[in-house]
């Protein structure tokens, strides 16, 4: 009997990931040899796009989508989703190029899809999930931010900002991808929130998130500044006054950790 995961596309956005790209592609091909890979490159000046083309020329499971300019992570994934939907993939996955998402754990997400889930999130914060090589202040901001998001929206999910995900094609076809918020990393929350509020089957599986070893992280303060601000607006509409009190306390925690980080690094 055919399974949804029999036609799986792993979307890997890239910008200046020349060293990381062949490593992550090789790991995906070894861990999940039946899935296809779509590299979405935002005109990387370091030659990542050319490397992607070279990899694709040697392997029919690898495809490349070139975009002009640095259009952002949300735009890259939306372009990848559309590319995959047009080609009738049953499952479309998000995966970082820097190795932080272990391809060896992809089967955990796909197994849940095959068992009926519409959206599966690889979570750092449920039992069995963990983060490797993160500084304490970043863990506090991420964990605290996700706790705030879950409470504000009432989703019961532990990691709504996570970027390791699998989507059943019907979910992505039924939502309006043009409406996704792209402030910071809020589009990940937006997708999860649409799934939960639309009564789709959303599940989390534990994953190990490992901080990149090669290159610089593209995560910045926009998560705090933009993402939590938008979530607060959503939460106020959804849960009312209780979110106001929660927002005040979370704001204190975020400011404390941010100031501590700036002092430590003389910023």
Image (cartoon, rainbow, N blue to C red):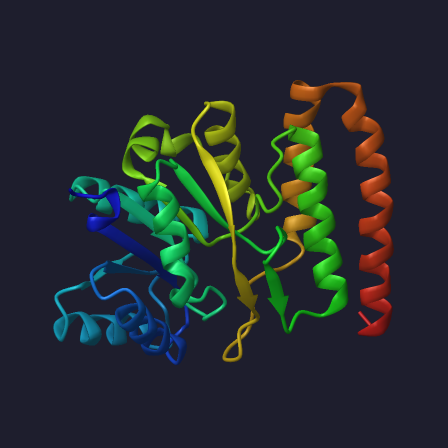
Pinpoint residue 40: horizontal percent, then vertical percent: 31, 58
> Which quadrant does the N terminus fall into?
top left
Please count the marks in the image: 0
Residue at image coords 30%, 75%: 26
93 sits left or right of 237 in the view: left
Q: Position of residue 24 (x, y in %)?
A: 36, 72
The residue that appears at 31% across and 47% down in the rendered structure is 92
**Nearer to me, 57 or 192:** 192
Give the residue furthest to the front. Answer: 1
Relative to the observer, which residue lies in front, 228 or 32?
32
At 51% from the left and 77% from the top, the residue drawn is 215
- Quadrant (top left, top right, bottom left, bottom right) of the C terminus: bottom right
When asked about the image quadrant of residue 241, the answer is top right
Relative image position of residue 182 (x, y in whole percent): 50, 42
State left or right for residue 26 relative to residue 54.
right
**Rendered position, 60 above or below 77:** below
User: In this image, 228 relative to 254: left or right?
Assistant: left
Where 87 sits versus 11, above or below? above
Along the line of sight, which residue is nearer the eye, 29 or 174? 29
Against 97, is 229 above or below? above
Position of residue 98 measured from the top left corner of the image (x, y, whole percent):
45, 70
Q: Is residue 60 visible?
A: yes
Regarding residue 76, the answer to whether it shows in the image is no
Residue at x-position 50% and y-position 37%: 192
């Amino acid at each position: 009997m055919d399974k949804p995961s029999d036609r799986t596309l792993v979307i890997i956005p890239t910008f200046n990931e020349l060293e990381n790209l062949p490593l992550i592609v090789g790991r995906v091909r070894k861990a999940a040899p039946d899935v296809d890979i779509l590299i979405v490159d935002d005109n990387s000046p370091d030659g990542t796009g050319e490397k992607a083309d070279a990899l694709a020329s040697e392997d029919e499971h690898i495809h490349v989508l070139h975009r002009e300019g640095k259009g952002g992570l949300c735009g890259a994934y939306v372009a990848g989703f559309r590319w995959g939907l047009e080609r009738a993939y049953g499952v479309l996955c998000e995966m970082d190029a820097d190795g932080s998402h272990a391809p060896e754990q992809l089967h955990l997400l796909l197994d849940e899809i095959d068992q009926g889930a519409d959206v599966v999130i690889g979570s750092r914060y449920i039992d069995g999930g963990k983060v490797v090589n993160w500084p304490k202040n970043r863990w506090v901001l991420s964990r605290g931010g996700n706790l705030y998001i879950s409470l504000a929206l009432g989703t019961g999910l532990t990691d709504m900002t996570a970027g390791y995900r699998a989507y059943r094609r019907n979910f992505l076809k039924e939502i309006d991808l043009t409406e996704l918020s792209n402030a910071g990393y809020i589009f990940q929350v937006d997708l999860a929130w649409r799934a939960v509020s639309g009564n789709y089957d959303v599940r989390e599986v534990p994953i190990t998130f490992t901080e990149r070893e090669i290159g610089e992280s593209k995560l910045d303060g926009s998560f705090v500044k933009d993402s939590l601000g938008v979530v607060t607006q959503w939460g106020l509409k959804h849960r009312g006054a209780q979110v106001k009190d929660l927002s005040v306390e979370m704001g204190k925690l975020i400011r404390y950790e941010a100031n501590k980080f700036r002092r430590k690094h003389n910023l």
